[in-house]
Image (cartoon, rainbow, N blue to C red):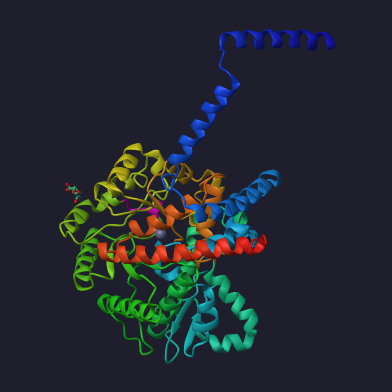
Amino acid sequence: MPRLIAISALGLLAVLLLAHSAYSVDVNEFLAQREQFLAEESSRILGGSITLNADEQLVNNMLMTAKTLEYDQSFSNLDFAPATNFFLAKPSMLQSEVFKFIQQMPKGGVLHIHDIAVTPLEFLINDASYRPNLYVCSPPQDPVFFQFASSAPANLVDCQWTLVSDRRAQEGPQQFDAWLRSKLSLYTPTPQETYPNINSVWTAFENTLIAASGIITYAPVFTDYFYQGLQSFYDDNVQYIEIRTTLPLVYDLDGTFTDEVQVTQLYKDTFDRFKSDNPDFSGAKIIFAPLRRVDTATMTKYLELASQLKAQFPDVVAGFDLVGQEDLGPPLKDFLSQFLAGAADPNLHYFFHAGETNWHGTDVDENLIDAILLNATRIGHGFAVAKHPSVMDMARSKGVPVEVCPISNQVLSLVADLRNHPAAMLFTNGFPLVISSDDPASWEAVALSSDFYMAFMGLAGRKADLRTLKQLAINSIMFSAMSTDEKNSAMAEWYKRWNTFILNQYNNYKTKHNLI
Ligand SMILES: *[C@@H]1O[C@H](CO)[C@@H](O)[C@H](O)[C@H]1NC(C)=O
Ligand SMILES: [Zn+2]
């Protein structure tokens, strides 16, 4: 044995000597090349073209000290929040210094969220569900149904309506409210067992939305709900919102329904009220996004309605999209003539969900091609975009961003470990993208900050710094559906908030280190 080692050691020496004479690159020269290589990659990352001023650089040093410490500890412990299902990772995220930094940071706008999961569940549980006249009907199998009514609605096949106030009194408020939460939230301490595949998690997800919508679409709750939704984002340092909505019919105690025009008006009134209470809020818009599983005649009606609403509420309505589990179809190409007819209205913009799938080469996956050819303003998710180089080229040249929603993709079973999220490649390539939170209430995320945190730690890599975060905020305003004037004033407001934020961070740092 020792002889063998001696021989191979000699062999190795020979190889090294040979190598040395054959390639006489000096180590320092090599290291210089290596530095240059890293610098070149660093300049290509999202935000790589931003130059930080002196104050920002100092804040960046603080941020990166916290980030690398957290990152490197995770590397040693093999325990990393973005690599863990959000339901289990949330407690450690809430403790993170980086997360706290991101919470305080002005993040611009949130461009991809859905009506029934905008507002934290606390509002539905602690406020809306305590209002009088709310009935519940819970069949043996989910979904549970809720409805406000002056008297008990007609019983359904396998459940009877009971007043929530009666059930709460019978079962005890704590127990009832915990049950209610479990019907509105996807949270589980055992995500893998509870949701073994993508269809089971989507079914559970849609059941929570059905349950919540019975409470939300009651007129007096509806406007308060969206007001509280805007408040939760505003409190998370988000200044602008675009909400995808099915424009659900909103009802009264006596069962009268509003139509889509009236519902749009309710949105407008709520947005106006919020803005007048908070003048530094830049505003909100809606994207009409009905369910995709309809026939072509219905799609035509939807598109006509979208055009009509856009004409009637030009500042409120941003455009059109479709919702529902994309894998189950139908694909966009089934409605091509409807969409092409819709595109004849130059004011109607598309914001299609596309490529929210792992099934490469299917019609669902090719929704990306239809979305970009239909001149979509942005692409929802675009989870599969990295597999379509021509879509990427065209999106980049036309300035069409993808709306990346990391936690949604994890909870809804597209990717378990966010380090493997395809948008990691979009970050390193400086591809146009925004970060959004899709349905934060359904998985009890913190408005926008949870997704920013997961993106910054899990997708953008260890070295992504303040420049990347700054670019994400700027992107969210640049790629929004705001008019040029609206963008200019939102951008000015954002810079004001950003400078205050940097100054505060800087002062905290000086206080901490006794530099004052
Ligand atoms: C998309 O935009 C291009 C360039 O403006 C235009 O030529 C094309 O007709 C548009 N396509 C659709 C489907 O509207
Ligand atoms: Zn979505």
Q: Is residue 330 magenta?
A: yes
Q: Is residue 313 above or below residue 41?
A: below
**Ligand 2 is in which quadrant of the figure?**
bottom left
Looking at the image, residue 120 sits to the left or right of residue 363; the answer is right
Q: Nearer the viewer, residue 381 or 394?
A: 394
Q: Which residues are magenta?
A: 326-331
Q: Residue at x 65, y 51 (%)?
A: 70
Q: Residue at x 61, y 89 (%)?
A: 169
Looking at the image, residue 368 sits to the left or right of residue 28; the answer is left
Q: Is residue 422 above or below residue 485?
A: above
Q: Nearer the viewer, residue 318 or 334?
A: 318
Looking at the image, residue 75 sits to the left or right of residue 273; the answer is right
Q: Is residue 323 magenta?
A: no
- Asked if residue 107 can be seen in this view, the reply is yes
- Asked if residue 404 can be seen in this view, the reply is no
Please provide percent x and percent y for residue 261: 25, 76
